[in-house]
Each structure stands twice: as C-alpha cells, then as structure tokens.
Image (cartoon, grey):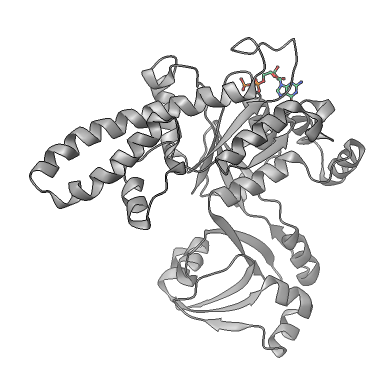
Amino acid sequence: ALTAGIVGLPNVGKSTLFNAITKAGAESANYPFCTIDPNVGIVEVPDERLNKLTELVQPKKTIPTAFEFTDIAGIVKGASKGEGLGNKFLSHIREVDAIVQVVRAFADDNITHVSGKVDPISDIEVINLELILADMESVEKRLVRVQKMVKSKDKEAMAEEPVLLKLREAFENEKPARSVDFSEEEMRIAKNFHLLTIKPMLYAANVSEDDIADPSSNEYVEKIREFAAEDNAEVIVVCAKIEEEMAELDDEEKAMFLEELGIEEAGLDQLIKATYQLLGLATYFTAGVQEVRAWTFRKGMKAPQCAGIIHSDFERGFIRAETVAYDDLVEAGAMATAKEAGKVRQEGKEYVVKDGDVMLFRFNV
Ligand code: GDP
C-alpha cells in the first residue's frame, strides 16, 4: 500500500497531527492489508460521493477507503551527516511514497522553537536542505561509478550520466530532484536512484486556534504559500491542536464545532484529500445492497488490476466489468434506470478505470 510520511522539525506539531489522524480512528478490521505499526496511522478518505451512493442504494453497510500516514520523527539540522537519528530518519523517508512537511505557523511563547524563533521559511529550508544533501551524496557516489563505465562505452552508464549531471546541478542550487525538467526517459532513469527529493511533497501549515477561521491574516501562512508556489507545491492550513480535539467527536458534533469556528471543511480532511491526490491515488466504488464501498487504486490501473484490489481471484478470473460513471448513476437515480439509459458500459481487460467509476466485476472462479 502507498503511504505518506509526515516530517518536520521538532515542536512543529507533528505528533499532535499524527494523534489526530490515529484517533480519528479507521476501523482497522476493514483494512486488513494495512500495516500494524505504532508509527503508522490509517485514515479514512472523506468522500461525499460515498454518502450519496449510500442514499441511493440503502446498503446494510458503507465502508470508506483508507490509506496510511507514517510519522517520521527525528529530523534535525545535520541529519544527512548522520547526526541525531539522521540515518534512520532518512531511511524511513526512503520508504514512503509522498511527503507531508509540517511547518510551524503558530506563535506560542510556551513552546520552544528549535532555532529560537518561529520562521517557517528557514524551517522549510533546513529540512529541504538535509534531503538535498542526502541525495547529493548518493548522486555523487553513483556518478563516480557511472563515469568509469562510460569510459568503456557502457550503454546504460551513458544514458545515466546526463541525468546524474542534471541532478547534481539542481542540488548545487539547492533545488530538489522533483523540480528538474526531465524528459520522460530521463525521469524513468532518475526514478531508479531512489532519491528523497524526487518524492512529491506538500506543506501543512500548522496555525494557532485563533487563525484557523482566517488563515490569510497569518503572515507565516502567506510566506509559506509564496515559497511553495515556486515549487508548485500545495499548502494546506491546519490547526493540529483543534484537529486532535475534533478527532474525539462524532460527525454531528464535528459539524457543529466547525460551524462555530466558521470553517467549511476541517483542515485534516483537506490534508487527507490533498495527500491522496499527491500519492496519485483515485477511488472507484462497488455498490451492492449488502455493502457500498470505496476502493483505492493507482491512477492508470486497468480493470483487472482494480478487480485484484478486492481479491486476487477477481483479477485471475477477470472476464469483464460493468461500469457506470458516478455522475451518470446519480443522475439516473438508480442502477436500473442507468441501464435503461444506456449508461452502464461493458468494459474489458484494457479498460483504464476512472476516478468515480462504479464497478461490478464478472469473473470465473
Ligand atoms: P512535534 O515535536 O513536531 O511532534 O510537535 P508536538 O506535536 O509534540 O507539538 C509540540 C507542542 O506544540 C505541543 O505542546 C503541542 O501541544 C503544541 N502544538 C501543536 N500544535 C499546535 C497548535 O496548532 N497550536 C498551538 N498553540 N500549539 C500546538
């Protein structure tokens, strides 16, 4: 399963946010494929479409889809040199598929800031630089090896060398690998290097309780947004402390609480959705009277692979899929009406599943 790692300097609110995620508590019985690890939190993906399908179909139960966040504590200045928990920290980042960087955007004199004052841009730069330095080291090592092989006209090495040189140049300018303008072929090569800064990243600006209703009034948030825009990275505003409190509430209480705060959607929900996008994930649905359920797939997956997410037998014995787009089904109001209107398609092995497809798989056992 794909997982997103939460990183950030000490005292920025990582644990608080991670607690909120874990407490919001996905029922792990529904997600047997997820890791059981204290540093891994399972989150359910909020999806209005699932509520709508539940209204239409009136199933016995409804199950949202979920994915994992990993809490990666321990980055400090010097991590790439192996200081603190440096190496361990970097190896944890290597295992995740996307990075959520928590940035402190709340002032609170009672909570020490590691570098003495709240300065989100300098915080971001500290972390990004550690990741870049670690990547620089791997690229330089590889470059030495590859350049020797280029001398003996090794084909693979000759293809790798320009990619490594581009990366080194970016790192020298303190730019992450994800910002390098690669051709498709170069990108394919670069992905083999297992770099940290090639992973997609977004920023979670952790603001104080007072700023959550109007984050634009927070100068730190504005600075983070400006910084992130240069990298085309997304910024989500959260108040980790409030999210931790809200995680204890049921849906109705949560809605009231949000209304009191004057916000439409909880920051954590926005963060979950944005991270899901960042991971390149999408959702299809199954909608039967027993169960209406959302399933996560990677964008680009074909129907048999998607069937295999439910059960490997579904993939092995795949015959075809009966598919209707979510919007078409909702417009028709019922599966039978959608069929009459010709909106239900028969799709074969080559069908690339789309976000929002409602699927029924036909298979041989
Ligand atoms: P970590 O070291 O990054 O995991 O940070 P923690 O989650 O342990 O938070 C450090 C301190 O900041 C704790 O005392 C938290 O209660 C406090 N904190 C975290 N988020 C917020 C927030 O949104 N507002 C305020 N005022 N304090 C927060």
Asked whether 270 or 177 is in front, the reply is 177
Q: Residue at x 56, y 26 (%)?
A: 124
Rendering coords of residue 236 (x, y %): 68, 39
Q: Residue at x 10, y 48 (%)?
A: 153
Q: Is residue 71 left or right of residue 324?
A: left
Does the rendering let one see residue 116?
yes
Q: Residue at x 77, y 28 (%)?
A: 218
Q: Is residue 5 left or right of residue 83?
A: right
Give the residue furthest to the left. Answer: 152
Rendering coords of residue 318 (x, y %): 45, 75
**Residue 38: quarter of image:** top right
Does the rendering let one see residue 26?
no
Q: Is residue 98 left or right of residue 255?
A: left
* Count of numbered marks: 0
Asked whether 246 or 171 is in front, the reply is 171
**Residue 313: quarter of image:** bottom left
**Residue 171: quarter of image:** top left
The C terminus sits in image quarter: bottom left
Rendering coords of residue 210 (x, y %): 84, 26
Q: Is residue 124 left or right of residue 20?
A: left
Asked whether 103 or 298 is in front, the reply is 103
Taking the image as four quarters, which one is ligand 1 found in?
A: top right
Q: Residue at x 69, y 71 (%)?
A: 326
Asked whether 319 or 150 is in front, the reply is 150
Image vertical order of residue 363 relative to residue 164, above or below: below
